[in-house]
């Protein structure tokens, strides 16, 4: 039962009648003087957990947040209620910063929001030294963890700041911390290490029964656009998340061309335009925003009816955080992922850029330290010396610079009149072996998070239960909320069961439900995955299909693949049917194609679980066969007319030869012309490099390019068979070639 005094304060100060799930437990811990780690979903009301205690106790509450828009919105809302609050971040001029620091030092404010980089400033820390700090709240606390999906190096300064401030009470809050990340947050903030006691951990409220979660398989952006256009009329207030800026611009333009009022949002737009977009969406001037993940933190609009992910996000944490921005008013909302395996390559590209190999980090440090007479080096010079010049390589160099800067190996010289430069820093030993080992561990963890998201996309089980289990919500784990495409699809087929909520069957616009494999199909799936596993990720799709079919082709026997115990495991199927099964297993996330010059097939961790039947997949539903229409009775043949003398005279004349049907599949002339031009270019490129032609690009990829006719890099990387390495080597040449062909 709620404390009437605390509930009365909640109503008097914030106008709320009751606490949301988990809020009361966190506030009780804070008011009792205990450190606390609160894990509550987006929209769960985390900010109240430090705002209410801040007003019930003497002293000032410091709120650390990396989200400038969020802190500005919260301060504006507090000031509107007459609560003394302010923020300190990079948007302030030097004069404004000085004025506010003076007001903070005089004790004018009860809540002070600061960006984490503020702890680099000695002047700011000197101001804090003279304050009575009642609570130190760390918002977005997953940023302190190297294993969190949004690690921020400046958060590592907080442990040192807490020690300097005399170890004030800490409340850490996040919406996206798995059990592993929670453990790391506790370690980084010193929970449980003297003089701090072990923090109380509250994990609540991850169940979002108002959200319908769905995954729709798509091929190409035209299919995605058709699905999006079907969704928006039913869910008119929506955020469409894209992985790249170019995707944002393309989707927004296509929607505007069809008369929809929408705005783009990404980090490449001017600050003023982004601020205007945010204000227009919040005020209801526009109901659709197409954005990268830069949009959404702190957006205060409760009636968002749909979150659509145009492309695959990098982790299940990022997906659920963004999905949680729908339905905050408690009304039903839809969260749909438009899934395409081509998009996975984009995330793998980002992983390469955000996890530089150890050798690259050392090369960057060497280039900067080896500059003559300690001359600072610009970014372009460092990229030229330390990387291969590819887009992923350039991104990896920038990541390496951030790491080396944090470790003290280098210093950044910021020039307001020109680009930044870097020179050797105070620590000549950095990076050390343990720093590089952490890099390897982070890369493995990031890759595992992406694979976990892919397993979620291919899972036939309850999507809510999968997410709740992933985050470890003790009150919701294992519960089926009956609000996802898989569960609703099963209920639509089988009828209401003991788990049914009584809601309507099916979802408007949902893809057809899948089905569980039969026992015979399970045998085929397990045999196929076993062969892929035994071949060790060294062979391509066709060779795998040959082994499964029992082929004695020379390439199979020369490699000794006919000696595998699983050779001929699916000898009753044709190569074409086996390849179709491999395609299905790739779409389900059980196998993946890797490599650019020579694509090979390998089993995924999820596929290994499916092979052991620890996990399941869905197969396409069988469409019921339409009954055959009765054949119309044949009309009686007309009697043949008797041959005329002329007929008889010409009956022995030779007939004109018949034209043989082409053995090639028909295709529009434009596609054929592009395909032929691409083959001619590939042959010339292969000869110049001394390689077989297929090592440049296989025919099937050339045909996909010819069909898609990409006009820019984002279009080209969406083509199956094109990855970051191929894009770097050949994108400009291929796009220029296609531009010359009508």
Image: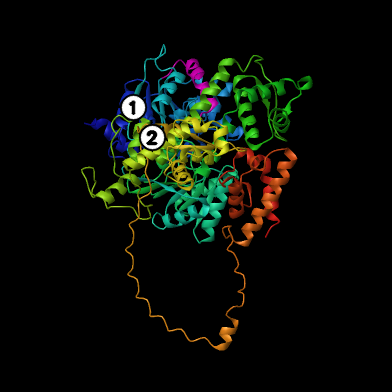
Q: Residue furthest top?
A: 194
| Tag 1 near tag 2, CB within 8 Å | no
Q: Nearer the viewer, residue 247 or 174?
A: 247
Give x and y (percent) for residue 113.
48, 31
Secondary structure under the numbered disc 1 in the rendered image:
strand
- The residue beneath circle 2 is 610
> Quick one: label 1 or label 2, which is nearer the N terminus?
1
Give x and y (percent) for residue 353.
59, 33
Q: Quadrant of residue 168?
A: top left
Secondary structure under the numbered disc 2 in the rendered image:
helix
* Any part of residue 39 in sight: yes
Give x and y (percent) for residue 83.
41, 35
What is the span of residues highlighted in magenta in the rendered image? 150-168
Please indicate whether residue 616 sits to the left or right of residue 655 in the image.
Answer: left
Question: Principal SS element in the magenta part?
Answer: helix
Residue at the location (28% across, 50% down)? 493
Which quarter of the figure is the N terminus placed in? top left
Residue at the location (46% across, 38% down)? 548
Q: Quadrant of residue 363?
A: top right
Please indicate whether residue 127 sits to the left or right of residue 739 in the image.
Answer: left
Looking at the rendered image, the disc whose residue lies closer to the viewer, 1 or 2, is: 2
- The residue beneath circle 1 is 202
């Amino acid at each position: 039962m709620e404390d009437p005094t605390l509930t009365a304060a909640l109503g008097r100060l914030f106008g709320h009648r009751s606490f949301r799930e988990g809020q009361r437990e966190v506030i009780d811990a804070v008011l009792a003087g205990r450190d606390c780690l609160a894990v509550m979903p987006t929209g769960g009301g985390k900010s109240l957990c430090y705002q209410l205690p801040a007003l019930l106790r003497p002293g000032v509450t410091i709120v650390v947040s990396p989200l400038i828009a969020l802190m500005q919105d919260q301060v504006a809302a507090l000031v509107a209620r007459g609560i003394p609050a302010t923020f300190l971040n990079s948007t302030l001029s030097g004069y404004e910063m000085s004025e506010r620091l003076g007001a903070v030092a005089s004790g004018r404010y009860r809540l002070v929001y600061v960006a984490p980089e503020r702890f680099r400033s000695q002047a700011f820390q000197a101001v804090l030294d003279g304050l009575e700090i009642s609570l130190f709240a760390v918002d977005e606390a997953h940023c302190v963890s190297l294993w969190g999906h949004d690690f921020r190096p400046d958060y590592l300064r907080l442990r040192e700041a807490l020690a300097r401030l005399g170890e004030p009470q800490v409340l850490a809050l996040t919406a996206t911390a798995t059990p592993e990340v929670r453990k790391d947050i506790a370690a980084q903030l010193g929970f449980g290490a003297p003089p701090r006691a072990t923090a109380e951990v509250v994990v609540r409220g991850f169940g979002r029964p108002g959200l319908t979660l769905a995954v729709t398989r798509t091929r190409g952006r035209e299919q995605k656009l058709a699905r999006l256009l079907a969704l928006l009329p039913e869910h008119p207030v929506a955020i469409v998340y894209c992985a790249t800026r170019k995707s944002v611009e393309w989707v927004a333009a296509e929607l505007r061309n069809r008369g929809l009022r929408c705005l783009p949002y990404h980090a490449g737009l001017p600050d003023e335009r982004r601020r205007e977009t945010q204000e227009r969406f919040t005020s209801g001037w526009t109901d659709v925003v197409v954005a990268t993940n830069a949009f959404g933190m702190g957006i205060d609009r409760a009636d968002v009816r749909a979150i659509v992910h145009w492309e695959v996000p990098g982790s299940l944490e990022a997906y659920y955080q963004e999905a949680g921005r729908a339905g905050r008013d408690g009304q039903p909302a839809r969260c749909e992922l438009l899934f395409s395996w081509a998009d996975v390559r984009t995330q793998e590209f980002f992983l390469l850029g955000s996890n530089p190999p150890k050798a690259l980090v050392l090369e960057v440090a060497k280039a900067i330290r080896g500059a003559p007479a300690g001359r600072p080096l610009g970014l372009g010079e460092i990229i030229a010396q330390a990387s291969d010049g590819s887009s992923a390589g350039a991104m990896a160099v920038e990541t390496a610079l951030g790491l080396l800067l944090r470790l003290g190996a280098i210093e950044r010289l910021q020039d307001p009149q020109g680009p930044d430069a870097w020179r050797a820093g105070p620590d000549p030993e950095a990076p050390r072996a343990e720093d590089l080992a952490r890099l390897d561990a982070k890369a493995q963890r990031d890759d595992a998070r992406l694979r976990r998201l892919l397993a979620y996309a291919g899972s036939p089980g309850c999507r809510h239960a999968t997410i709740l289990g992933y985050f470890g919500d003790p009150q919701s784990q294992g519960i089926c909320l009956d609000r996802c495409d898989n569960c609703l699809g099963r209920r639509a087929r089988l009828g209401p069961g003991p788990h049914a909520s009584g809601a309507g069957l099916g979802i408007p616009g949902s893809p057809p439900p899948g089905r569980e494999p039969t026992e015979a199909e399970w045998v085929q799936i397990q045999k196929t995955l076993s062969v892929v596993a035994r071949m060790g990720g060294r062979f391509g799709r066709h060779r795998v299909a040959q082994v499964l079919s029992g082929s004695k082709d020379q390439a199979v026997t020369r490699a000794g693949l006919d000696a595998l115990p699983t050779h001929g495991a699916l000898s009753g199927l044709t190569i074409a049917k086996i390849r179709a099964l491999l395609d299905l297993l790739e779409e389900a996330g059980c196998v993946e194609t890797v490599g650019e010059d020579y694509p090979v097939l390998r089993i995924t961790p999820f596929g290994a679980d499916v092979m052991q039947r620890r996990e399941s997949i869905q197969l396409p539903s069988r469409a019921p066969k339409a009954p055959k229409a009765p054949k119309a009775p044949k009309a009686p043949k007309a009697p043949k007319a008797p041959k005329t003398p002329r007929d008889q005279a010409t009956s022995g004349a030779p007939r004109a030869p018949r034209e043989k049907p082409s053995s090639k599949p028909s295709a529009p002339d434009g596609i054929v012309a592009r395909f032929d031009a691409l083959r001619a270019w590939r042959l010339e490129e292969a000869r110049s490099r001394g390689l077989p032609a297929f090592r440049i690009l296989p025919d099937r990829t050339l045909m996909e390019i010819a069909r898609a006719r990409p006009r820019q890099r984002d279009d080209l990387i969406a083509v199956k068979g094109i990855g970051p390495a191929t894009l770097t080597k050949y994108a400009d040449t291929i796009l220029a070639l296609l531009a010359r062909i009508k």
